Structures are given as structure tokens and as C-alpha cells.
Image (cartoon, rainbow, N blue to C red):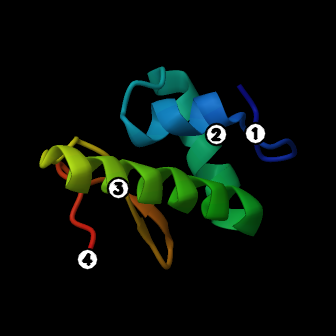
Amino acid sequence: MEFINSHPSEEVLERYLFESLATQEVEGVEEHLLVCHSCIASAEQILAFVNSLRTTLGEKPKVRRASSAGLDRETESSFS
């Protein structure tokens, strides 16, 4: 699936962040995130929501984390 010229849906971003996106779609989403500040902001909002849930529930769900170069893979969320 090609996302470089179109924005991935929120559902696709969520599946990407929770590492449940099909392997063939991951590269397209990552390429899009390298050039789209809007989608990076959306991903960061999703991660902020996850962090809020994590704090409320006292759990650390497995998600990717935002970095200045896009989104890096990480085994657990580590928001401060």
C-alpha cells in the first residue's frame, strides 16, 4: 500500500504503532512519516493517549515511540 502521496488512516497509524500492521504496509507508512509532519503529530497524539491509559491503568503497553527522525521501534512505551 502506497502512503507517500496520501495520509494513512488513524486505524493504520494505530496498527503501525502497536506493531500489528501487515509487513508489506510498514515501509510505506514509515516513508510517509519521514515527510509528513501532520501524520507525525497524529501518531504523537495517539501515543499521548496510550500514555494516559498506561498511567491510569498502571501498565506499559508495547508501542513505538516518537523521535525527531520519525518513529523508532521500542518494546515498551517510555514517556516522561
Q: Quadrant of residue 48?
A: bottom left
Query: Badge 2, how many Cα within 10 Å: few under 14, some, many 20+?
Result: some
Apparent side of residue 68 relative to residue 54 in the rendered image (left or right): right
Query: Badge 3, how many Cα within 10 Å: few under 14, some, many 20+?
Result: few
The alpha-carbon separation of the residues under discs 2 and 1 comes to: 5 Å
The alpha-carbon separation of the residues under discs 3 and 2 comes to: 28 Å
Which part of the image, by quadrant, shows the N terminus?
top right
Disc 4 designates what residue? 80
Earlier-in-chain disc, 3 versus 1: 1
Disc 3 designates what residue? 52
Which marked residue is nearer to the observer: mark 4 or mark 1? 4
Residue at figure coordinates x 39%, y 24% from the top left: 20
Q: Secondary structure at mark 2?
A: helix
Residue at figure coordinates x 72%, y 37% from the top left: 8
Q: Position of residue 58 (x, y in %)?
A: 12, 49
Which marked residue is nearer to the observer: mark 2 or mark 4? 4
Earlier-in-chain disc, 4 versus 1: 1
Which part of the image, by quadrant, shows the C terminus?
bottom left
Earlier-in-chain disc, 4 versus 3: 3
The alpha-carbon separation of the residues under discs 4 and 3 comes to: 11 Å
Q: Are marks 3 and 2 in contact (CB under 8 Å)?
A: no
Disc 1 designates what residue? 3
The alpha-carbon separation of the residues under discs 4 and 1 comes to: 30 Å
Q: Nearer the viewer, residue 44 or 69?
A: 44
The alpha-carbon separation of the residues under discs 3 and 1 comes to: 28 Å
Q: Secondary structure at mark 1?
A: loop
Residue at figure coordinates x 21%, y 65% from the top left: 78
Residue 62 visible (yes or no): yes
Which marked residue is nearer to the observer: mark 3 or mark 1? 3
Q: Are marks 2 and 1 in contact (CB under 8 Å)?
A: yes
Residue at figure coordinates x 17%, y 48% from the top left: 75
